[in-house]
Amino acid sequence: MQLETIKKAIREWRILRQSKKASTDLLGQGSLFHIDVKKVLEVSSRIDPIDPTYIHAYLGVHEGKLLFFLMNNIMDSEIEFTKEGKRIEDFIVVEEAIYMDQDQFAPFITTSQSRYFNSTDAIPSNEAITRIIHWSVLKNKWINSAITTPNGLFEAFVIPSVDLEKETEVFALFGLKKKKPGQYPEAELIIWNETKGFLLSNPEVESSFEDIVRPVPPFGQGITAIKNFHLMQVSELSRSVTL
C-alpha cells in the first residue's frame, strides 16, 4: 500500500473514532489482528546495532475496512522518513481485523499456559479469556463512554517486542481490563504467541512501563511521547496541507 493511502486511512480513523456508530461498526469487524514479527521488526540498515524495542500499531480505515498499520519504533522516526530515496511504506505491515479461529486458540483457552511480559509469574489463561470476553460483550458500551472522554478512542498501540517470537504465529487480541475495583475497564491488546499462549500486561506492576501494551492517546513521556509517532504526525500534516 502506498504511503499516501496509509496516511489517508489513519486520518479516516481519526475522524470516525469520534462517531459512536462508525467506531462501533468498525471495531466490530474483528477482535484481533496478525503480527508478522519478523517483517515488522525489519530496519533499513543493520549498521546501527540497536534493535527495535517496540511496535507501533496504528488503526486506519480504507474502503470501509478496519486496518492496522504496524511499524517498529526505529523506522517510525523523522530520521527514517526523511532519508533520500527511502520507501518507508516498505517497512509498514498492513493487517486486517479478523475474528478468532476457535480451533487455533482452543488449546490455550483450556489450559493455564500464559504469563506476564518479562515475568516468570504464571497466571491462569482464564484471566486472558475474561478480558477478551469483556471486550466482546462490553465494547459497545465502552466505546460510547470512551468517546466522551478528553482522549477519546485510541489511535494506536505501543507493543513491546521483547516477547514477540519471530518463528511462531503471533496475534494481538482486543481486551478490556479493570485498573482498580469499581473502575470501568480500559482497552488493551493481549498478545498471543503460538508457543507461549497469552502474554498479559501485569495490572499490579504499574512500574513495569516498558513491558505493558499501551494505547495512545493518552500521550505521555518516553515511549508514549507524541514525537515518537512520526507516521501519525505526517498523517495529520498531510490533512493540513490538503485543506
Image (spheres, helix red, strand yellow):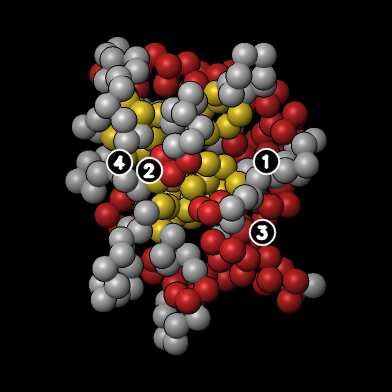
Q: Could you say which is closer to the camera, residue 226 or residue 102?
A: 226
Q: Could you say which is closer to the camera, residue 27 or residue 192?
A: 192
Q: Give the secondary structure at mark 4.
A: loop
| Residue 240: percent from left, percent from top | 75, 71
* Crowding near the residue tagged with mark 1, few <14, some 14–19, many ≥20 C-alpha atoms within 10 Å: many
* Crowding near the residue tagged with mark 3, few <14, some 14–19, many ≥20 C-alpha atoms within 10 Å: many
Q: Amino acid at mark 1?
A: Leu
Earlier residue among tags 2 and 3: 3
Q: Amino acid at mark 2?
A: His
Q: Give the secondary structure at mark 2.
A: strand
Earlier residue among tags 1 and 2: 2
- Cα distance in 3D space between marks 3 and 1: 14 Å
Q: Which residue is labeled 1 in the image? A: 153
**In this view of the protein, can residue 69 be seen by the observer?**
yes
Earlier residue among tags 1 and 4: 1
Q: Which residue is labeled 4 in the image? A: 163
Quarter occupied by residue 74: bottom left
The numbered dot on residue 110 is none
- Cα distance in 3D space between marks 2 and 3: 22 Å
| Residue 180: percent from left, percent from top | 60, 19
- Cα distance in 3D space between marks 1 and 4: 26 Å
The numbered dot on residue 34 is 2
Q: Which residue is labeled 3 in the image? A: 11
